[in-house]
Image (cartoon, rainbow, N blue to C red):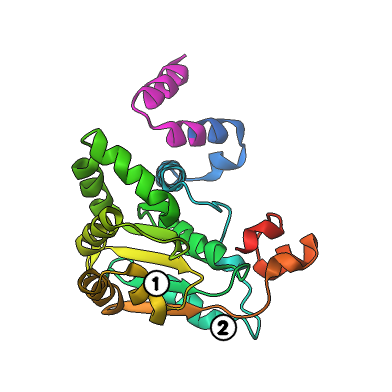
Amino acid sequence: MMMNNTLAQLRELKLVGMASAVEEQLCSTASTAMSFEERLALMVDREVHQRADKRHAALLKRARLKYPQACIEDVDGRAGRGFERPALMSLALSRWVEDGTAVLVTGPTGSGKSWLACALAQYACRRGRSALYLRVPRLAEELRILHGNGGFTRWLAALARTDVLLLDDWALAAMDGPTRADLMEVIDDRAGTRATIIASQLPVEHWHAWIGDASIADAILDRLLSRSHRLALKGKSLRAQKPGAATAAIGGSDTADAAR
């Protein structure tokens, strides 16, 4: 009865991991050979890891990644893809998020840009960092709604606090004036303080022309390129392969469509 009350109190205090560890120890004869300090350390360790797992799951859910299953460990760095796996892992393990680095992923359609970008953002979530996935072609409509309901300022402030912003399908469609100005505000808030990942079919040297307005283009590119890391993917479309082969080439567990 006393132990039941203790377990109930642990759960009321939201120490669910510790309560689970206590129950396991009660059912294990091996735990009786441990000292009090050892058993307590195991209970606390379980609580710490369970809270970390819960936080990481929440961060990943809020990120709304196109490919939440993408893992940096599964990325295929075979020759001819435009990057070396050690260099990619070095980037992922570096302070790119803390330093506010822009990661610019370019390449032809089907080369794995979106998947690789999602893998970087997913790894940031696993390290306890917040992330958010946005598709640039949809941004204009979303921004019009935010301006219409008065939520733009609040949205912009929340975005500025997000550790990693992933802008997918950058330069896929023409951009109007209001969207261009809003995008400038987004990039300006993040320059040098928050990390930004951009995935685009268009090579970086053509971004100035796509942005359109020379002054805004200069300002956006200056902020993005001043502290950036580029990954220029190459090779044939991974979607053109058989589904199983494409999945293996990408390194993910989904279908070949994840090769974008």
Percent x, y of residue 203:
46, 78
Left/right of residue 118 with respect to residue 142 in the rendered view: right
Asked where in the image residue 146 lies, by quadrant, the reply is: top left
Secondary structure under tag 2 reads loop
Q: Amino acid at mark 2?
A: Gly
Residue at (31%, 45%) from the top-left corner?
A: 143
Asked where in the image residue 175 lies, by quadrant, the reply is: bottom left
Q: Pick the residue in front: 203 or 128.
A: 203
Asked if 160 appears above or below 207 in the picture, the reply is above
Secondary structure under tag 1 reads strand
Percent x, y of residue 228:
33, 77
Residue at (65%, 85%) from the top-left corner?
A: 79
Q: Which residue is mark 2?
A: 82
| The disc label shown at residue 103, or none | 1
The answer to whether residue 250 is visible is yes
- Residues in magenta, as a range: 1-21
Does residue 92 show up magenta in the picture? Answer: no
| The disc label shown at residue 35, or none | none
Majority secondary structure of magenta residues: helix
Q: Pick the residue in front: 27 or 61.
A: 61
Residue at (28%, 66%) from the top-left corner?
A: 98
Does residue 17 show up magenta in the picture? Answer: yes
Percent x, y of residue 188:
21, 64
Q: Pick the residue in front: 227 or 16.
A: 227
Q: Pick the residue in front: 55 or 106.
A: 106
The answer to whether residue 38 is visible is no
Q: Amino acid at mark 1?
A: Val
Percent x, y of residue 16:
44, 31
Asked where in the image residue 193 lies, by quadrant, the reply is: bottom left
Mark 2 or mark 1, which has the lower sequence index? Answer: 2
Q: How many marks?
A: 2
Q: Residues within 10 Å of mark 2 (few under 14, many from 20)?
A: some
